[in-house]
Each structure stands twice: as structure tokens, then as C-alpha cells.
Amino acid sequence: MSDAIGTPVLEAIDVVKEYTSGDGSTLRILDGASLTILRGEMVAIIGESGAGKSTLLHILGALDQPTSGSVRIDGHAVHTGGEAALASVRNRSIGFVFQFHHLLREFTALENVMMPLLIAGKATGTVRGRALELLESVGLSSRADHLPSALSGGEQQRVAVARALAPNPALLLADEPSGNLDRGNAERMHELFSILASTHGVGVVVVTHNRALAARANRVLLLDGGRVVESSAMAEEVG
């Protein structure tokens, strides 16, 4: 995996996604969407509700297959194998952060961050050190031994970010990551994403309706009519 800041980490070319509606007609959600994300940059994707932002993110993250088009992560084609190959890409190259953190309630913050690496068969000693470093990077080293129920919503979401970074992914994908947080915690989350992109050398893609979060991105992309275009218009929230 290349770790050179500024090199392409994600390339999507002419991605099309179609569904068959109840009456048998074809509904095209993505219509030739293309974008390139560089390592070390944070990119926000905005667009009206129903524009297909989450659909695009799921295809970029190997959670869904495109109808046509291609996606490459670190130069490697994503959708060329079966489900086992997609799972390998997800586990090795991609970290996910969703609106709801989905922490394992019976495990501590530290154990939650360790979990992806333990599942991958990494040695416990090495995993613990990595998890502690990540919790420190999101400002939660003092909360490592707390269960999720003892953490605030913002703290739980920061644990989820640390967990997503645990496998050292090339790409971090976030779908409305601050949508369930109050204003203060949302602002801290926004700052964290912009810092993590540069300090961890990861490409960060954030789907959001939040104007403040999009304003922190290096670039803002607008999904409109199934295509992706550069956007600098942040005068009002989209959606």
C-alpha cells in the first residue's frame, strides 16, 4: 500500500447504478459518476436528499456493486471478484463511520477498537498498543476502559472513528457521521476528520448535509443528476 501524501487512493470512473422499480421500469440512481480522492485529503460529498449519496458511498466502499463503471483503491480494481474478494477489500483497505456508531455494548472502548485487528488474527499485544495510540489520537486515552454506556454520544462516535482506523486503511468513508450529535460534539467531530486525513495519510470521504462539516473539507463535490461535479457553493446547506 502506497503511503505517499497526495497520490490517488480512490478512483471511480463512470459509475452507473440502476434498480428495477415495482412496475418493472429502470431507475437510474447514478449516471456516470466519476471522482478521484487523494491520500491525505478530506472530500465532502453533498447533494439533495435522494440524490444517491449513500448509494455512491456504498459502491465506493465495496458494500454494493455498480451496474457498470469501475472503482479502484490504491490502483487495484474493487469489483472484479466475488463476495470474498469484496470482503477482503473492505477489511484491508477501507474504514467505515456511520451516523450511528454501532459499538459492541459489552466491550470497553479499547476492546472495541481492538476488535477488527483481533478478528484479523493479529497478536493481542500489538493490537492493544495500536488501539491505545488511536484512542489517544481521538482524545479518548483516559476513557479506554469505559463501556459505551459510560461514554457520551460524541465520545462513542470518536471510538467508532478510532475503530475504523485500526486496520490502517487507505480510505475512510463516513456517512453523516455527525448527524446524531449535538452541535458541540458535531464540531469536534468535524475538526477530528480534517486532522485525521493529514496525520494518518488516509483519504477521507464524508457524505453530509452539514454545511460546517463540508466547509472543513479540502474539496466539496456535488452529486446532482447522478453525476459528481466540483462545488464551491457553501452558501446554504443542501438537502
Image (cartoon, grey):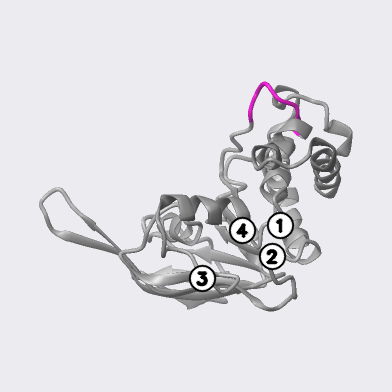
Q: Which amino acid does the dot numbered 4 rest on?
A: Ser
Residue under pointer 3: 72
Q: Residue 193's mark?
A: 1
Secondary structure at numbered mark 1: helix
Q: Nearer the viewer, mark 1 or mark 2?
A: 1
Secondary structure at numbered mark 4: helix
| Magenta span of residues | 104-109
Residue under pointer 4: 93
Q: Which amino acid does the dot numbered 2 rest on?
A: Arg
Left or right for 190, reference 81: right
Left or right for 136, reference 180: right
The answer to which of 81 and 61 lies nearer the viewer is 81
Q: Is residue 159 above or below residue 188?
A: above
The residue that appears at 72% across and 48% down in the rendered structure is: 166
The answer to which of 44 and 7 lies nearer the viewer is 7
Q: Nearer the viewer, mark 1 or mark 3?
A: 3
Q: Where is residue 82, by image quadrant?
A: bottom left
CA gap between label 4 and label 2 equals 24 Å
Count of labels shown? 4
Answer whether labels 1 and 2 touch (C-beta < 8 Å): yes
Residue 58: x %, y % from top left: 45, 55
Q: Is residue 46 above or below residue 232?
A: above
